[in-house]
């Protein structure tokens, strides 16, 4: 949700978006919902306004396939940069929960509860395969190594977290509204209005991270 204080994190994860749940559309998210998520969130979370489009069905995302971030989601799976290599900073903590690593739904809810205690705002999404992202946006840039270390600390507490997107200055992540390798779409697991509010009113960086370190 956009402002998490006072609301249960579990409310962000509707049953239809959980692993094993059925989408009303055999293609996963409808194209319309994917486009809405892309328009509302993706330009704000990309570390630079670029996208890497996979040419092999989502197996690889080579740097040579990078191009300017398009106005509409590509028809192929794609990723956006987590950091800005030019400034060696980032404005997002990308929490990537992988279904192969544990109970994604339970751990995603716990991550949301932690952010709620810290007074944070975030964007939450889910893929057709059940993997989840929790994206925490900051009002000002932070050193990339600091963000990397926060992701690693969270992974010690929540083992379903894959720290790969945060582990190098060239880290990439699939954004909300992007095509999934299964053929579906990565969708928001929260109301669109709340996701939009989260990117329009990002978190105070030091407030969230310092309180996380003391939690």
Image (spheres, rainbow, N blue to C red):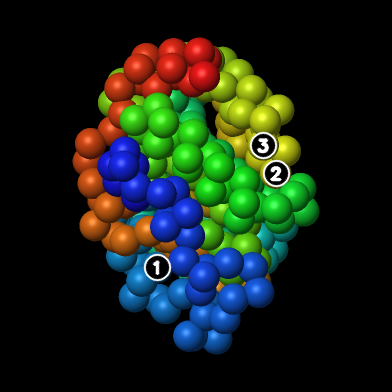
Q: Nearer the viewer, mark 3 or mark 1?
A: 3
Residue 113 visible: yes
Residue on which disc 3 sits: 158
Q: Is residue 59 left or right of residue 29?
A: right
Asked if the residue under mark 2 is in contact with the one under mark 3, i.e. CB atoms within 8 Å, the reply is: yes
**Residue at the disc numbered 2:** 160
Residue at horizontal 40%, vertical 76%? Answer: 31
Circle 3 packing at 10 Å, graded few (<14), some (14-19), many (20+), is many
Q: At which x and y percent is residue 136?
A: 42, 36
The label nearer to you, 1 versus 2, is 2
Q: Give the Cα distance between marks 3 and 1.
A: 28 Å
Left or right: where 111 falls relative to 84: right
Q: For the image shown, how many numbered marks are present on the structure? A: 3
Q: Nearer the viewer, residue 114 or 37?
A: 114
Task: Label 2: state its secondary structure.
Answer: loop
Give percent across and percent down for residue 182.
65, 72
| Residue 78 image offset from top left, x and y in percent | 54, 56
Packing grade of label 1 (10 A; few <14, some 14-19, many >=20) is many
Q: Is residue 49 visible?
A: no
Residue at 67% from the left image edge and 36% from the top image edge: 158
Q: Are marks 3 and 1 in contact (CB under 8 Å)?
A: no
- Name the element at disc 3: loop
CA–CA distance between discs 1 and 2?
25 Å
> x, y (%) of residue 108?
56, 48
Instruction: Pick the residue in front: 133 or 64.
Output: 133
Q: Earlier in the sequence, mark 1 or mark 2?
A: 1
Q: Is residue 10 above or below residue 14?
A: above
Residue pictured at 52% horizontal, 15% vertical? 213
> Which residue occupies the foreground of this view, 3 or 6?
6
Residue beneath disc 1: 34
């Amino acid at each position: 949700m956009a402002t998490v204080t006072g609301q249960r994190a579990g409310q962000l994860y509707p049953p239809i978006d959980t692993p094993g749940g059925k989408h009303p559309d055999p293609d996963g998210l409808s194209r319309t919902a994917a486009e809405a998520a892309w328009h509302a969130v993706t330009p704000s979370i990309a570390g630079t306004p670029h996208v890497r489009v996979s040419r092999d069905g989502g197996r690889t995302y080579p740097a040579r396939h990078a191009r300017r971030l398009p106005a509409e989601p590509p028809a192929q799976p794609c990723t956006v940069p987590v950091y800005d290599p030019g400034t060696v900073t980032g404005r997002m903590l990308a929490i990537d929960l992988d279904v192969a690593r544990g109970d994604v739904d339970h751990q995603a809810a716990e991550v949301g509860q932690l952010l709620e205690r810290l007074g944070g705002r975030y964007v939450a999404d889910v893929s057709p395969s059940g993997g989840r992202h929790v994206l925490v946006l900051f009002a000002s840039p932070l050193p990339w190594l600091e963000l990397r270390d926060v992701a690693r600390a969270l992974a010690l507490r929540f083992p379903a977290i894959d720290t790969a997107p945060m582990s190098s200055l060239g880290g990439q992540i699939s954004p909300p509204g992007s095509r999934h390798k299964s053929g579906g779409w990565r969708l928001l697991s929260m109301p669109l209005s709340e996701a939009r509010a989260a990117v329009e009113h990002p978190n105070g960086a030091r407030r969230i991270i310092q309180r996380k370190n003391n939690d």
